Amino acid sequence: MDKARFDKLHIKLFLAIAGAIAALTLAAYFVFTTSFERGFVQYLNRADELRLESMIERLAEGYERERGWAWVANDRERWVEMSRDALGLPRPSEQGAVESGPRRDTPLTIDRRLMLFDADRTRLVGRAEAADSAVLKPIMVQGATAGYLGYVPRPEMVESIERVYLQRQRVAFGSIAVGMLAAALLLGAGLAWWLTRRITLLARGTHSLIQGMYDVRIDAPGHDELAQLARDFNTLAATLGATRAARQQWIADIAHELRTPLALLRAEIESLQDGVRPLDQTSVASLATDTARLARLVEDLHTLSMSDVGALSYYKEPVELAEVIADVVDGQKRTLDDKALRIELRLDDTVRVLADETRLAQVFANLLQNNLRYTNAPGRVAIALRRENGRAVVTWEDSGPGVAQSDLPRLTERLYRVESSRNRASGGSGLGLAIARAIVEGHGGKLTARASALGGLAIEVSLPAFK
């Protein structure tokens, strides 16, 4: 139970963000306090040394004037007064005035840590117990060492007002650290809530998609990665919805297309069984025609399904594209003459492509069947082949009737016919152009439809040319 709670994303984000900031805050607190204390102590020691320079000068002057150290070694008050003057400490009279007000600690305690040594380093003034730890500063008189001024460096934890000041700094740093920790907790909680709220919306939307509710959409304000992810999610949902609708329409169209030839075939068989029609060669030929139409439709559906899954096989080799087109046209020469369709060929014999010749022949046969079904007699079919920018371009045009501009983009859709009322015996299943486009795209090409200058439809096939 506890483990499940800690596995939540918002808990992990909160712990990661707040923990990182808290660790940085604590590290900064210890670094700042330690460095400040050390720096402060070093500053005071340096300040002491600078102050001692003036006292060394006065001691050197006194030694040269009195020709020895007796004048100060035997006069404690002079030593104290001299050290206070050199270090800028208040005189006793001034200190008494200060003490009449609120009682304060002595601001500096360096006078208790000063000592005087002669040239042989014998202590003359100062506490004996501090002599071993004293730092000696030479007192030079006329180029010779007349003695030493010794002082004990400030300890790591300084006394009096320095201690109070450091304590106040620690409190200040501690307050800042506590404030930063509180801010870290609030920031971590806020960021965790903000991030997980948007991720939760995506998770809910994903669950809706799993349940098949493709109309779900997620608000995508902003321009960050999560907003882009939300927009991609909406695009995915719309695509899935469109795919489901297309699949449903596809299934309905297939069922409708299969129902018609099956109904015709069943009606003819029942008429033969009931004796309404005689069983002769004409009846058998009609049954064969219906069966062939049904087999062709099933084969076309199989070809498209294989293309969808990428299993449509191609045996590519260098192909003379003009020969393939000419063979397809020659194979339908009699049918074209019967339909009073005149063929105009303008083919560049030098254009070659790396392709499956059988599949390309299927493409051009479908285009020619489209002309035979929809071009009014007498009519024209103009076929041109040229090389353009390293590609083989086939333009396949016919005369009227034309196709509305709004219908052109949908001509290569499966089972789509411009006129739904057109008889299927002449109009076909609406799969020919879809199969042609699938084969052309399988060869790295492109098939597009546009209005023809002849008044009908123009199909352009573009394939990579083979050198």
Image: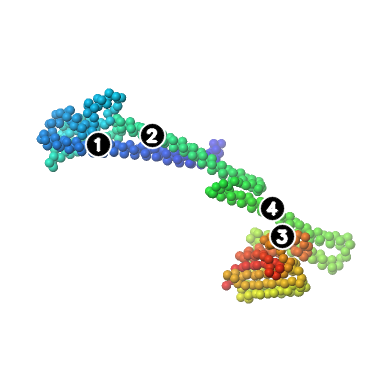
**Spatial distance from mark 4 to mark 2, Cα to Cα?**
68 Å
Characterize the local packing of mark 2: few (<14), some (14-19) or many (20 or more) Cα atoms within 10 angstroms: few
**Spatial distance from mark 4 to mark 3, Cα to Cα?**
15 Å
Mark 2 and mark 3 in contact (Cβ < 8 Å)? no
SS under mark 1: helix
Pointer 4 or 2: first along the chain: 2
* Residue extending furthest toward the bottom: 349
Characterize the local packing of mark 4: few (<14), some (14-19) or many (20 or more) Cα atoms within 10 angstroms: few
Identify residue for label 1: 48
Identify residue for label 4: 245
Characterize the local packing of mark 3: few (<14), some (14-19) or many (20 or more) Cα atoms within 10 angstroms: some
- Residue at the location (33% across, 36% down)? 37
Relative to residue 86, is residue 330 depicted above or below?
Answer: below
Give the left or right position of residue 38, taking residue 93 as reference: right
Mark 2 and mark 1 in contact (Cβ < 8 Å)? no
Q: Amino acid at mark 1?
A: Asp
Mark 3 and mark 4 in contact (Cβ < 8 Å)? no
Identify residue for label 2: 172
- The image position of residue 17, as x and y in percent, is 48, 41
Identify which residue, 160 or 291, lies in the foreground: 160
Q: Amino acid at mark 3?
A: Tyr
**Spatial distance from mark 4 to mark 1, Cα to Cα?**
89 Å
- Residue at the location (30% across, 24% down)? 102
**Spatial distance from mark 3 to mark 1, Cα to Cα?**
99 Å
Identify residue for label 3: 416
**Spatial distance from mark 1 to mark 2, Cα to Cα?**
27 Å
Pointer 4 or 3: first along the chain: 4
**Spatial distance from mark 3 to mark 2, Cα to Cα?**
80 Å
Q: Is residue 316 visible?
A: no
Q: Amino acid at mark 2?
A: Ala
Q: Amino acid at mark 4?
A: Ala
For discs 4 and 1, the disc positioned in front in the rendered view = 1
